[in-house]
Image (tube, rainbow, N blue to C red):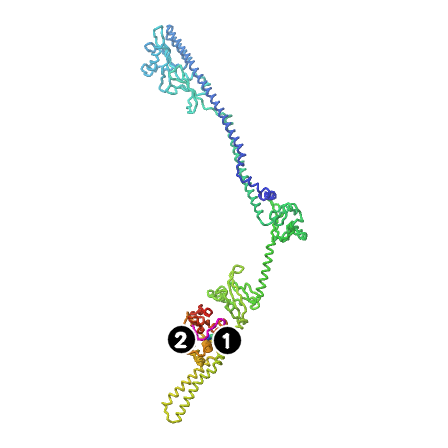
């Protein structure tokens, strides 16, 4: 919806800015992050500066702590040193008292008690004589005193002895090395030499408790703040102000203690710093704020990114729609709720020829309204604004800017904005001039087609292949059969529609053409088939073809042309042909009548003679049956001969229906030659039959073929007689042989041959070169032979020197039954040299 709004709002301006805008948006989102860099950098700088400040503050604080620590250690050291120095001085004073001799055991005890009171770290004091014997011990700790007094204590001995010796030698106060008791407490002895002039009177020994030193000499405020320990040279802690275990990270500071020296140091540990609340708060505040700012930046970046992506999608969508709108061929127009044009797309402008500026903002009447249709257009506009526009749209005429008109269809739909509120009406306009013209042309073509089909004198019908339903029937079909499918089925050669067969179990025997034998329909060829429809007593030439009907189903189209008249004419012609052939035979006989009479006369005369002779013999009374028998036999022979001639003549002129039958070629040849010889003999021409091959039976009408042969032989004899009446032993040869499935009968004469002009017209009806000729003979011969699916042609007999010695009429007849396999599909031998040799 957002896209729609943006699109609608920017629709008008996008056209101009569409080219430049995408580049702003398609160059990646680098800019979308750059504005985040500044705050990010600021935060980083701020973090770095804050860290530096905090670090320096911390550093300074540490420095201060270290300084304070150092000062305090120095102070502690100073305190201890002062105390020890004070004790040393007091011991020195005691030693002087001993030298002066003023001391006695009591005063020694008092003095030492004073000192020990002032220095509680001193646990034991004594005067050791020069022989190292304790003289006036003053013991704060009896146990220790005992231990110190025990000369057998090796450790004591050694430490004390060493210090004693050193004090004696150096005449200076000497601290002994550290001594330890059973529990690890450390002690140190200060040996103060007592010299009276040069006499060594021994030492005043004072045993210092290291712990005591620590406890006495370290001010409490210091020990409250630090853990202060005294350690020996081996880093062993001799005494400490706190039993708290030392943390490895604790800062400490060592300062050597001198006195007492001997590797003893004071070590001050700084306790872990109490958390600096302000500092920490500041740090956490800064860190928290930085995190918050970073998070804000991140969410801002995320938000911006989403916005950017949404914007990208929006722009892509907008430009896609713009591109679509620009590329569509449908004109689009937007009206506001008051009927004012608020937007037109380029296709609308292209269609109408009006610019966007001519149209946008205009109210009715719009510039593209034809002037003569204002009321109609206004009515359509009112319907649109009332929301009553038909869903099928308006068909209207639109005026282009150049004044020309075109037909258009306008569809209207409400324009709804993203909030679901209708803001206007969106109309889409299509130029239907071309489709309309095409539709009209189609309708006209359809009408023409229907007119032609309807006025055809042929029955055109289409039958559904899966049920006996007539899908189409033209006027002629309806005239003959009504609208029943039976006519189609009858024309298909399958008789009436057999609904029981269609629904019976014998479905395998019939196809989906409900009752029609499958074979009859599946032939489905476009070859014409002649069908006689008994019901209406008409002949039809039927052509069938399977077609895909308009609904995609298989259908059979059938065109049945009425050929009844043609059939009748053919029948008439056939009958006339028969009559003609018969007449022709009669004429031949008529022409041969004198010859035949002469031919018949001979046996009759012979019979007469034989009978007369026999009568004379019988009358003479001298005859015997043996004498008569040969005469009578000869008489009978002559009667048979006469009978044969008559039989042949009778059969030749017998009028019968043409009938094909299996006939031996030899029989036909014998009969034909028998008749023709009568005529030939008159002209002293011999007919020689050359029939060397065994010939098969042929299926012909023997009378007609005989007629052909008689005609050819007769023509040959006439031609030979006319051309060479005085020729010596003229012969006509009748050659019979087999030639590639045909029986070839060739009549070879010795006549003049056939010249080129005659050859072309030879077989025409009524062509004759004879004064008394009818010119029908060869024409009838050819039609007879062709009706037997054979051929008749002529070639000249040409000598090697080019001399023509006669003509040969070839006639070929197929072997086998009329539609049998032996000659099916083969053609009669072609006349090869009809013209070539002429
Ligand atoms: P008609 O014999 O009545 O003339 P045909 O049809 O039998 O009619 O013959 C037509 C013509 O063909 C003849 O007039 C003759 O000129 C020519 N013709 C027929 N047979 C021969 C042949 N064997 N030799 C030469 N010409 C022939």
User: Residue 769 got which mark?
Assistant: 1
The answer as to whether callout 1 falls within 8 Å of ligand 1 is yes
Q: Secondary structure at mark 2?
A: strand
- Front residue of 789/618: it is 618
Q: Quadrant where the N terminus lies?
A: top right
- Front residue of 391/617: it is 617
Q: Judge from the rendering whether residue 51 lies leftward or rightward of residue 365; answer left or right.
A: left
- Front residue of 46/787: it is 787
The answer as to whether callout 2 falls within 8 Å of ligand 1 is no
Rate crowding at label 2 as few (under 14), some (14 to 19) or many (20 or more) other CA atoms within 10 Å. few
Residue 36, horizontal then vertical, whole percent: 53, 34
Residue 475, horizontal then vertical, whole percent: 58, 66
User: Residue 690 got which mark?
Assistant: 2
Q: Which residues are magenta?
A: 744-757
**Residue at the spot 34% in from the left edge and 14% down from the top edge:** 162
Residue 35, horizontal then vertical, whole percent: 54, 34
Is residue 336 something one can see in this rendering? no
Is residue 347 something one can see in this rendering? yes
Q: Nearer the viewer, mark 2 or mark 1?
A: 1
Residue 94, horizontal then vertical, whole percent: 39, 9
- Front residue of 798/158: it is 798
The answer to whether 307 is drawn above or below residue 646 in the figure is above
């Amino acid at each position: 919806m957002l896209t729609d709004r943006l699109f609608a709002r920017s629709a008008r301006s996008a056209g101009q800015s569409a080219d430049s805008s995408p580049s702003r948006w398609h160059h990646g989102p680098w800019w979308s992050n750059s504005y985040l860099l500044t705050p990010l950098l600021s935060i980083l700088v701020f973090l770095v500066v804050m860290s530096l400040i905090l670090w320096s503050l911390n550093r300074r604080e540490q420095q201060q702590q270290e300084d304070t620590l150092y000062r305090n250690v120095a102070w502690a050291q100073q305190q201890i040193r002062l105390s020890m120095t004070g004790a040393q001085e007091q011991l020195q004073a005691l030693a002087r008292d001993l030298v002066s001799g003023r001391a006695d055991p009591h005063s020694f005890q008092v003095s030492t008690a004073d000192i020990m009171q002032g220095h509680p770290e001193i646990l034991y004091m004594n005067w050791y004589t020069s022989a190292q014997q304790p003289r006036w011990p003053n013991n704060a700790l009896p146990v220790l005193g005992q231990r110190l007094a025990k000369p057998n204590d090796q450790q004591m001995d050694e430490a004390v002895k060493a210090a004693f010796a050193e004090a004696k030698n150096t005449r200076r106060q000497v601290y002994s090395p550290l001594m330890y008791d059973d529990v690890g407490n450390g002690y140190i002895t200060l040996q103060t030499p007592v010299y009276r002039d040069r006499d060594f009177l021994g030492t005043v020994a004072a045993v210092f408790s290291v712990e005591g030193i620590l406890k006495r000499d370290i001010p409490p405020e210091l020990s409250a703040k630090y853990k202060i320990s005294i350690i020996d040279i081996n880093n062993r802690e001799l005494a400490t102000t706190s039993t708290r275990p030392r943390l490895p990270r604790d800062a400490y500071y060592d300062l050597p203690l001198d006195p007492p020296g001997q590797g003893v140091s004071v070590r001050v540990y700084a306790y872990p710093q109490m958390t600096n609340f302000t500092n920490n708060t500041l740090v956490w505040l800064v860190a928290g704020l930085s995190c918050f700012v970073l998070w804000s930046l991140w969410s801002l970046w995320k938000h911006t990114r989403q916005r950017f992506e949404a914007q990208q999608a929006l722009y892509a969508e907008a430009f896609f729609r713009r591109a679509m709108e620009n590329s569509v061929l449908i004109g689009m127009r937007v009206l506001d709720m008051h009927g004012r044009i608020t937007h037109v797309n380029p296709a609308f402008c292209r269609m109408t020829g009006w610019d966007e500026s001519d149209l946008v903002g205009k109210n009715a009447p719009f510039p593209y309204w034809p002037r003569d249709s204002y009321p109609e257009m206004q009515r359509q506009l009112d319907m649109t604004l009332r929301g009553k526009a038909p869903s099928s749209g308006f068909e209207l005429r639109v005026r282009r800017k150049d004044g020309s008109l075109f037909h258009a269809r306008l569809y209207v739909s409400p324009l709804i904005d993203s909030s679901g509120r209708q803001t206007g009406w969106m109309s889409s306009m299509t130029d239907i001039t071309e489709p309309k013209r095409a539709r009209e042309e189609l309708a006209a073509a359809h009408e023409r087609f229907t007119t032609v089909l309807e006025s055809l004198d042929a029955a055109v019908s289409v039958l559904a292949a899966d049920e006996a339903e007539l899908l189409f029937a033209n006027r002629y079909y309806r005239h003959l059969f009504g609208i029943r499918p039976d006519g189609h089925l009858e024309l298909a050669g399958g008789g009436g529609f057999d609904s029981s067969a269609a629904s019976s179990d014998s479905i395998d025997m019939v196809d989906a053409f409900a009752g029609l034998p499958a074979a009859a329909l599946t032939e489905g060829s476009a070859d014409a088939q002649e069908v006689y429809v008994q019901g209406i007593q008409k002949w039809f030439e039927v052509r069938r073809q399977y077609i895909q009907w308009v609904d995609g189903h298989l259908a059979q189209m059938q065109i049945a042309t009425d050929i009844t008249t043609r059939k009748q004419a053919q029948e008439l012609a056939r009958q006339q042909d028969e009559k003609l052939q018969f007449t022709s035979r009669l004429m031949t006989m008529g022409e041969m009548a004198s010859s035949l009479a002469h031919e018949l006369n001979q046996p009759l005369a012979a019979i007469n003679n034989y009978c007369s002779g026999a009568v004379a013999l019988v009358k003479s009374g001298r005859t015997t049956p043996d004498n008569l028998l040969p005469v009578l036999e000869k008489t009978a022979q002559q009667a048979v001969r006469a009978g044969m001639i008559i039989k042949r003549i009778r059969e030749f002129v017998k009028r019968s229906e043409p009938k094909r039958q299996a006939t031996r070629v030899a029989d036909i040849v014998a009969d034909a030659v028998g008749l023709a010889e009568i005529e030939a003999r008159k002209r002293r021409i011999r007919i020689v039959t050359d029939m060397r091959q065994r010939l098969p039976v042929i299926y012909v009408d023997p009378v007609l073929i005989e007629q052909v042969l008689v005609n050819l032989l007769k023509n040959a004899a006439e031609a030979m007689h006319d051309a060479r009446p005085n020729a010596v032993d003229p012969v006509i040869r009748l050659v019979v042989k087999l030639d590639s499935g045909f029986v070839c009968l060739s009549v070879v004469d010795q006549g003049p041959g056939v010249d080129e002009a005659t050859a072309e017209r030879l077989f025409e009806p009524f062509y004759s070169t004879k004064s008394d000729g009818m010119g029908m003979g060869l024409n009838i011969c050819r039609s007879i032979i062709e009706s037997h699916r054979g051929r008749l042609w002529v070639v000249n007999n040409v000598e090697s020197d080019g001399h023509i010695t006669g003509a040969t009429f070839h006639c070929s007849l197929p072997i086998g039954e009329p539609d049998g396999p032996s000659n099916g599909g083969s053609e009669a031998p072609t006349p090869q040299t009809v013209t070539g040799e002429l």
